[in-house]
Image (tube, helix red, strand yellow):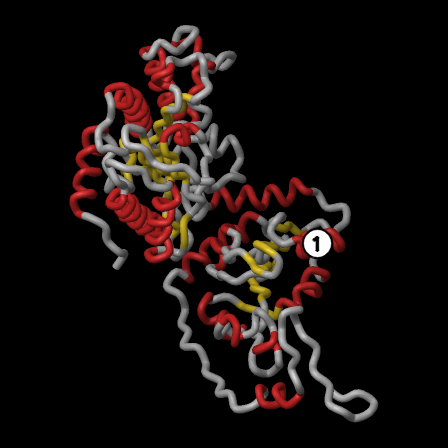
Amino acid sequence: MADNSGKSQPAPKTESHDPDFPEAFLSFMRQGWREDPLAVAPLPEVPNYAKRRNALSEAFTGETLIIPSGNEKVRANDTDYHFRPGSDFFYLTGDRDPDSVLVLHPSGSGHDAVLYTRQRNSKDTDRFFRDRNGELWVGRTHTLAEKSTELGLATAPLGDLGAALAGSAPGRTRVLRGLDANVDRAVLAYEPDRSKPRDRQLAGVISELKLVKDEWEIAQLQAAIDATVLGFEDVARVLPADRSVKERLLEGVFGLRARHDGNDVGYTSIVGAGAHATILHWVRNTGVTKPGELLLMDMGVEGNNLYTADVTRTVPVNGTFTPLQRQVYDIVYASQQAGMDAIKPGVVFRDVHKVCMRVLAEGLDDLGLLPVSVDQAMSDDSTVYRRWTLHGFGHMLGIDVHDCQAARTETYREGPLQEGYVLTVEPGLYFQPEDELVPEELRGLGVRIEDDVLVTADGCRNLSAGLPRAAGEVEQWLASQREAGPRLPG
């Protein structure tokens, strides 16, 4: 640009570390670019997303529904975490971009769905090479028309969202909160007296729509679980029986499989060697394995369509359980098997929990640890057995590792299982190193076994049966994987 003297001045920088751009460079960058359209076609799963939006529409006739994808999160300074869209947003759209917002506008007896999303930082402006989200920095992005074709959904510029929200009827708007602060503020500005329970009801309805998985979703989960099985095999093949390795080596080996075969890990991997196995959410993974100790690994691949596995195995590092390790392992295995045997349509979720917990309590009694009888320990006014098993038997699984969390208690925790539910079964026993109420030989020993099961018409099917569960089978599996040797994903 020019100042009052008519001399050319450098264009302003966008970041402190950016170079100055003289006008000659800017002029040169603005010319000579070919515009290549993207080859886009409707995604095969477009009908699934449309069906879900229609179900949501039927639940809120005449109301405006707002579901954001979420924003990029800063990791440090000017670098962001890898973006993953909000699960409910993706469940309804299939869109993967940040800052997008799905709005269901009431229309007659239904809704018109519009996706408000970023426009391209194309070569029409300098932003394509100067902006950190410009296409020379991040690659070609979709036009609104291309995205509409791919998702089977009407699109509009994100800049039009404010006017669209301003036109929504007061008292007849619901928003999925906590994903986009700008959207939350905008809706409050137009409806300052709105009731938050209305928004919680929107989140709850979406969660309950997600409870029953269709065939496509089950296939997505199975693919993620199959990749997870391969990831556990990868880890077993590099786990030495006779020397220590870092927990983070094992975490990284599994992470390679997750990024190669899927989108990423579905959650931060838990790799707990020795006493770290007793820490339920041990995600620092700063320890090392030790022959003679157990290794607990809770890991899952998130598939390319964001459905995730959630599997845990506890293995003896040297390849063989000690008698005491095996006794504890067998208690947990019996608890898990009892839970799986109890699962079928009509059985209340909480009752499966009670079945699993009773087996654990009986095992703790056999170990001489319960201060009261099993019945007393299981009573609602006691539950002292939980000192050594703090969590429940499992949870719903799907596009979130803890899926359907906003569902009503009477539908989820106190509700009957239905055919098409997918849930984990993951009992565990954990004896903390500093627990003076257990014998010294038990301290620092932790065992969890977790599998992903589909509720079928007459029971359940273990989707993660590709990994062995029984103690002897685990030992044989570990030996066979070590014999096969390391491999790269292919």
Q: Nearer the viewer, residue 52 or 255?
A: 255
Residue to which mark 1 is pinned? 187
Helix, strand or loop at disc 1?
A: helix
Give residue 470's quadrant in the image. top left
Q: Is residue 122 left or right of residue 374?
A: right
- Type of the residue with mark 1: Val
How many residues crowd around disc 1 within 10 Å: few (fewer than 14), some, or many (20 or more)? Answer: many
Q: Nearer the viewer, residue 302 or 103?
A: 302
Residue in view at x 60 percent, y 59 percent? 103
Residue in view at x 59 percent, y 57 percent? 71
430 to 243, vertically: above or below: above
Q: Nearer the viewer, residue 18 or 170?
A: 18
Q: Is residue 473 visible?
A: yes
114 to 468, vertically: above or below: below
> What is the x, y in percent for residue 457?
29, 37
Give residue 26's quadrant in the image. bottom right
Total numbered circles? 1
> What is the x, y in percent for residue 374?
39, 10
> What is the x, y in percent for residue 369?
39, 11
Q: Is residue 418 visible?
A: no
**Quarter of the figure that contains the N terminus:** bottom right
**Quarter of the figure that contains the C terminus:** bottom left
486 to 455, vertically: above or below: below
Residue at the extreme right? 4
Residue at the extreme bottom? 6
371 to 118, vertically: above or below: above
> What is the x, y in percent for residue 267?
44, 45
Q: Is residue 122 left or right of residue 321?
A: right
